[in-house]
Image: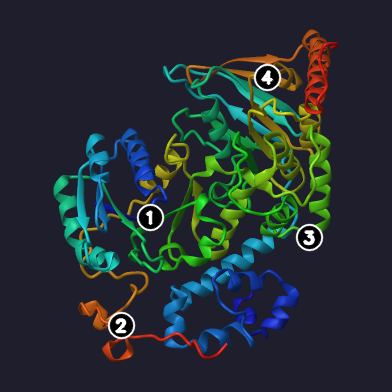
């Protein structure tokens, strides 16, 4: 089975892009399934179901969504194999912009939207910087010039990525994106033993363990302090 | 590009040769190296490495790819003298059966009802279709298959698309906005270009505007004028796709002259009779396919003059309404 990780900031249009792309993949005779990772709530699994796309949903709840993703991705992959799909797509939101869901040797896609502001590409970490494909959405809402400025900023942050514009509503560009999914022919047997492209956001401190009180004496473990006295 | 040489060169020297090298560090939220790039990478602390969000080897690879990409942008791009569209199939699977060669400076209009497939044709051109889209059309540039890598590199894309939407989300003045756009394209003397674009946009707009006007306060016509001037003078893309220039208080003839004057190939989806007749040819789309190609006849061109006369009259009336005139005499 082939595997693709799709990630991006919340509300950037990941689900809409995947829905349209899966439709195009179907026209090519490829069956796709989706694993949807979210934090507290999502209804998106129903959207996939409506289109007859096999879907599995995972909610991270109180855990770091990125850590939850990597802890469950291998099992999700096995689920995909049982569904008999040709391509499994994982969808996960990058909630803190420091997320790093991309896996070595697995096609990595980052979805980011034109409305998020031209400085956004600078603010997103490994999720954007190490992606193979960057999909820019909501291009129909802004002018040509603004689209170009945004794409150019993305290209500066990640010069090696293929950059595409996809309209999640009309589906313009989804066919083109499906070409990249279909052309990536690397078959994967298992994710066990594979490695993330970059380490995930790290924290191992008292707050991870449920501490609620504020103050230095309650802080233990991996704690980083701002320099408020200088500069 | 000698990577070792670049790695070991003091960064100040590198900047003198490639001023854009600093942009890469800036864009990643990093301070520019004080010594060489190699020195910079070697001396990163664990925390800095962690915050960089990318492995050093990958970071360097991106840095070199960026230098190469921008370096090739500042070189003169190859001239596109012709674009050829070879027909594929329509939605019913019937052959379109046409081959159309469009030369630089030509205007081709695309007409047809909503949903007939005009946008798909524009998309085929933008994607440089090679028989691999649902329509099976093929696009050739200067008579040859285009380079597939163009599809994914915004800076080398030979196609600029001017869409119907002219909204801005950036909160900048017209001048600042065009400047940011010019800088993102690594244009030489951006300030000169900016002034030229503001001046030309004002020639197109029915209502004049100042370069210090925030883009979000421009009227529909003014923003369209600004974007057309911007595309004509800033975009290096020799092919311009236009999804309808609405009749929103801009001089459409001047707008097209401006684009074609820069030796661009213009393809425009439109329902406007004036624009349609300004085109050299028009493609009639039906059922997702090109059903007919009409060459603008001499007779049609004569009618164009009449239409333009009507249009001028309407524009004049529009201005009179704007200035508070009474329209009892027209």
- Bin the neighbour count of mark 2 within 10 Å (Cα to Cα): few under 14, some 14-19, many 20 and up: few
Q: Are marks 4 and 1 in contact (CB under 8 Å)?
A: no
Mark 3 vs mark 1: tell me if same chain: no
Which residue position is annotated with label 4? B272
Q: Nearer the viewer, mark 3 or mark 1?
A: 1
Say what secondary structure mark 2 lies in.
loop
What mark, if any, has residue B188 been given in the picture? 3
Say what secondary structure mark 4 lies in.
loop
User: What whole-number distance in Å separates the C-alpha atoms at marks 4 and 1?
Assistant: 40 Å
Quarter of the N terminus of chain B within the rendering? bottom right
Q: Mark 2 and mark 1: span between their CA atoms?
A: 29 Å
Name which of mark 4 and mark 3 comes first in the sequence.
3
Labels 2, 1: front one: 2
- Residues flagged by tags 4 and 1 on a common chain: no
B60 or B132: nearer the viewer: B60
Disc 4 residue crowd, few under 14, some 14–19, many 20+, Cα 10 Å: some
């Amino acid at each position: 089975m082939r595997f693709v990780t799709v990630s991006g900031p919340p509300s950037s249009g990941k689900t809409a892009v995947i829905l349209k792309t899966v439709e195009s993949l179907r026209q090519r005779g490829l069956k796709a399934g989706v694993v949807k990772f979210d934090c507290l709530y999502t209804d998106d699994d129903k959207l996939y179901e409506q289109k007859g796309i096999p879907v599995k949903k995972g909610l991270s709840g109180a855990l770091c969504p990125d850590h939850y993703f990597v802890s469950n991705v291998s099992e999700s992959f096995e689920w995909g194999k049982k569904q008999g799909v040709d391509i499994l797509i994982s969808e996960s939101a990058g909630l803190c912009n420091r997320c790093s869901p991309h896996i070595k040797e697995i096609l990595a896609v980052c979805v980011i939207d034109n409305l998020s502001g031209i400085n956004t590409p600078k603010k997103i970490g490994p999720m954007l910087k190490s992606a193979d494909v960057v999909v820019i959405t909501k291009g129909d809402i802004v002018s040509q010039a603004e689209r170009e400025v945004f794409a150019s900023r993305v290209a500066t942050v990640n010069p090696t990525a293929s950059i595409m514009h996809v309209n999640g509503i009309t589906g313009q560009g989804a066919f083109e994106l499906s070409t990249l999914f279909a052309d990536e022919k690397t078959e994967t047997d298992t994710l066990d033993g594979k490695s993330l492209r970059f380490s995930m956001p790290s924290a191992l401190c008292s707050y991870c363990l449920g501490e609620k009180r504020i103050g230095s004496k309650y802080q233990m473990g991996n704690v980083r302090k701002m320099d408020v006295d200088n500069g | 590009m000698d990577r070792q040489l670049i790695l070991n060169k003091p960064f100040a020297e590198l900047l003198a040769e490639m001023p854009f090298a600093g942009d890469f560090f800036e864009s990643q939220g990093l301070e520019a190296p004080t010594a060489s790039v190699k020195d910079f990478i070697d001396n990163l602390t664990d925390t800095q490495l962690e915050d960089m969000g990318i492995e050093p080897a990958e970071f360097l690879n991106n840095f070199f790819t960026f230098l190469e990409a921008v370096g090739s942008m500042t070189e003169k791009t190859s001239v596109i003298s012709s674009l050829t569209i070879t027909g594929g199939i329509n939605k019913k699977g019937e052959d379109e059966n046409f081959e159309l060669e469009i030369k630089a400076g030509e205007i081709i209009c695309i007409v047809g009802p909503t949903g007939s497939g005009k946008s798909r044709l524009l998309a085929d051109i933008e994607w440089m279709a090679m028989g691999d889209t649902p329509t099976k059309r093929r696009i050739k540039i200067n008579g040859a298959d285009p380079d597939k890598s163009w599809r994914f590199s915004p800076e080398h894309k030979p196609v600029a698309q001017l869409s119907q939407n002219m909204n801005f989300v950036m909160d900048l003045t017209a001048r600042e906005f065009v400047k940011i756009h010019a800088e993102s394209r690594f244009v030489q003397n951006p300030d000169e270009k900016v002034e030229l674009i503001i001046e030309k946009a004002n020639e197109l707009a029915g209502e004049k505007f100042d370069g210090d006007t925030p883009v979000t306060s421009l009227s529909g016509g003014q923003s369209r004028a600004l974007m057309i001037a911007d595309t004509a003078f800033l975009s290096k893309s020799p092919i311009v796709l236009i999804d309808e220039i609405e009749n929103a208080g801009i001089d459409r003839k001047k707008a097209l002259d401006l684009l074609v004057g820069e030796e661009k190939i213009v393809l425009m989806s439109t329902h406007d009779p004036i624009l349609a007749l300004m085109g050299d040819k028009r493609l009639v789309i039906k059922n997702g396919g090109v059903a007919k190609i009409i060459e603008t006849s001499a007779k049609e061109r004569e009618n164009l003059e009449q239409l333009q006369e009507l249009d001028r009259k309407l524009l004049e009336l529009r201005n009179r309404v704007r200035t508070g005139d009474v329209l009892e005499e027209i």
